[in-house]
């Protein structure tokens, strides 16, 4: 049964032994972030962490690492906790095909229980804020679902974006955030500023696990994240109407913050320890004026630790990057078999494909770089044959070592777009990109000596299953 809010998911994690309640008193800094950092070092079955005894806070309830293992990610999708990564990606892709599933509007949203408005707004009284890394420039809201609308077409439901962006708290009623130029909210802000208007915005914290997944998905500009959430849940996503902006927001959120992005106003935001495993420096970024805060009684503050992979963010944005790229590539190249974009939100991507003719694999690699997500993220593409599993890194390394002639198979394309956070870019936002063709050449690309490959014996798949069963029964 799908989860309508964060609390019901935490209950499920608890029942499966995937929620660790830390009852002894901890310091907000460095204990909270250090514990979440450590969770990424204890293995793929790491639990979510729940803190309710934090020094200096009264009645703080803090959840971290909620999506931070493949077991937790499987449970978020309603799958058995031992579902393999490959099976989770395949099920994700299967559910994608049910898109769109219209959401269900409800009126009794639990976040309506308490309200702050005007001069009474004080985020520090609602949220137990703390820094995630010791070099961060301040307190961050980094696991929110941010809702905005295209001011040129505000009634178009699909153009209402739900995204995840880093947000720094710079005052009791003021925020600064970083809209990456390739993301929808940046387009909304650009349009609003061209019109000389402020951009209404809603920030929702503590959401159900699938809303959090779709908020980080690279979808089409006019595709609704709520309709995708319904497809992934297998049931309509519950939404409610935000009282000030009238926007559609998740029904089960813990906190709903409404306000506006102030037109043409910028303030220094950062530094921040990013998902790339590096700090990004301070930059002048748009500011948000908060006009209303609605929240559940005793809200659970969900936060996300980012740093040197793997951390929770890598589990969160792995499958939801693989599948959109797979679908977008297959729309034009049905020969594409699978896409592994697990690494740093798809900065590096591995694609397996059949080939129509010589040079085809390189064309697939170039298309991966020019998908909506690829324009800002995909900097390296490794293309392998259809019989190489892109999720099996030993197979990928074999293909690279045996099939790549660097002079012919490594393509460097200079001066392409990339997100400004990419640490390898010499100029923020511009980088060279690389395609490695690790496929077997086909006519008319007749080169190399690949005529007599060794194949798995026909009985190997059957024996693989038998051995797995015997090992499991020991």
Image (cartoon, helix red, strand yellow):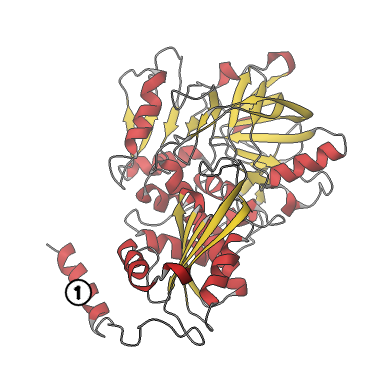
User: Is 187 left or right of 63, judged from the image as shown?
Assistant: right
Image position, residue 76 (x, y; %): 45, 49
Image position, residue 318 (x, y; %): 46, 53
Residue in the picture at 63% in, 61% down: 370
Residue in the picture at 56% in, 32% down: 254
Q: Is residue 130 above or below residue 228?
A: above
Residue placed most toward the observer, 18 or 37: 37
Q: Residues within 10 Å of mark 1 (few under 14, many from 20)?
A: few
- Secondary structure at badge 1 equals helix
Q: Is residue 103 above or below residue 350?
A: above
Can residue 438 be seen at all in this image of the molecule?
Answer: yes
Q: Is residue 27 above or below residue 424?
A: above
Residue in the picture at 57% in, 36% down: 144
- Kindly indicate the quadrant of the structure image that contains residue 334: bottom right
Residue placed most toward the observer, 281 or 327: 281
Q: Quadrant of the C terminus?
A: bottom left
Residue labelled with disc 1: 466
């Amino acid at each position: 049964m799908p989860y309508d809010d964060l609390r019901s998911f935490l209950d499920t994690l608890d029942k499966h032994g995937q929620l660790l309640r830390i009852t002894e008193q901890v310091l907000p800094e460095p204990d909270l972030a250090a514990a979440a950092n450590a969770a990424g070092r204890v293995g793929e079955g790491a639990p979510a962490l729940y803190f309710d005894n934090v020094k200096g806070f009264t009645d703080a309830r803090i959840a971290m690492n909620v999506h931070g293992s493949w077991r937790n990610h499987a449970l978020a999708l309603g799958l058995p906790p031992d579902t393999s990564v490959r099976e989770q990606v395949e099920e994700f892709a299967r559910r994608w095909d049910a898109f769109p599933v219209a959401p269900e509007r409800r009126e009794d949203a639990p976040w309506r229980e308490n309200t702050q408005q005007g001069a009474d707004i004080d985020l520090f009284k609602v949220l137990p804020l703390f820094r995630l890394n010791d070099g961060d420039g301040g307190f961050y809201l980094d696991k929110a679902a941010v809702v905005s609308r295209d001011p040129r077409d505000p009634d178009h439901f699909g153009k209402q974006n739900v995204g995840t962006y880093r947000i720094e708290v710079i005052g009791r009623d003021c925020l600064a955030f970083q809209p990456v130029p390739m993301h929808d909210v940046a387009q909304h802000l650009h349009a609003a500023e061209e019109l000389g208007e402020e951009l209404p915005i809603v920030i929702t914290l503590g959401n159900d696990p699938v809303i959090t997944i779709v908020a980080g998905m690279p979808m089409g500009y006019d595709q609704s994240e709520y309709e995708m959430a319904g497809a992934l849940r297998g049931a309509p996503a519950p939404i409610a109407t935000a009282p000030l902006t009238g926007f559609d927001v998740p029904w089960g959120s813990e906190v709903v913050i409404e306000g506006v992005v102030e037109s043409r106003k910028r303030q220094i935001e950062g530094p921040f320890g990013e998902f790339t495993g590096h700090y990004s420096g301070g930059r002048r970024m748009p500011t948000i004026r908060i006009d209303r805060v609605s929240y559940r009684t005793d809200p659970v503050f969900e936060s996300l630790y980012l740093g040197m992979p793997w951390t929770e963010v890598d589990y969160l944005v792995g499958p939801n990057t693989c599948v959109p790229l797979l679908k977008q590539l297959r729309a034009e190249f049905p020969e594409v078999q699978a896409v592994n974009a697990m690494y740093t939100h798809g900065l590096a991507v591995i694609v397996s494909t059949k080939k129509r003719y010589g040079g085809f694999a390189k064309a697939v690699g170039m298309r991966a770089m020019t998908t909506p997500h690829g324009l800002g993220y995909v900097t390296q593409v490794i293309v392998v044959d259809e019989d190489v599993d892109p999720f099996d890194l030993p197979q990928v390394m074999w293909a690279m070592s045996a099939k790549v002639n660097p002079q012919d198979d490594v393509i460097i394309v200079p001066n392409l777009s990339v997100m400004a956070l990419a640490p390898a870019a010499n100029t923020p936002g511009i980088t060279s990109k690389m395609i490695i063709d690790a496929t077997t050449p086909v006519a008319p690309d007749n080169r190399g000596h690949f005529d007599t490959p060794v194949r798995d014996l026909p009985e190997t798949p059957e024996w693989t299953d038998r051995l797995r069963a015997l090992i499991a029964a020991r």
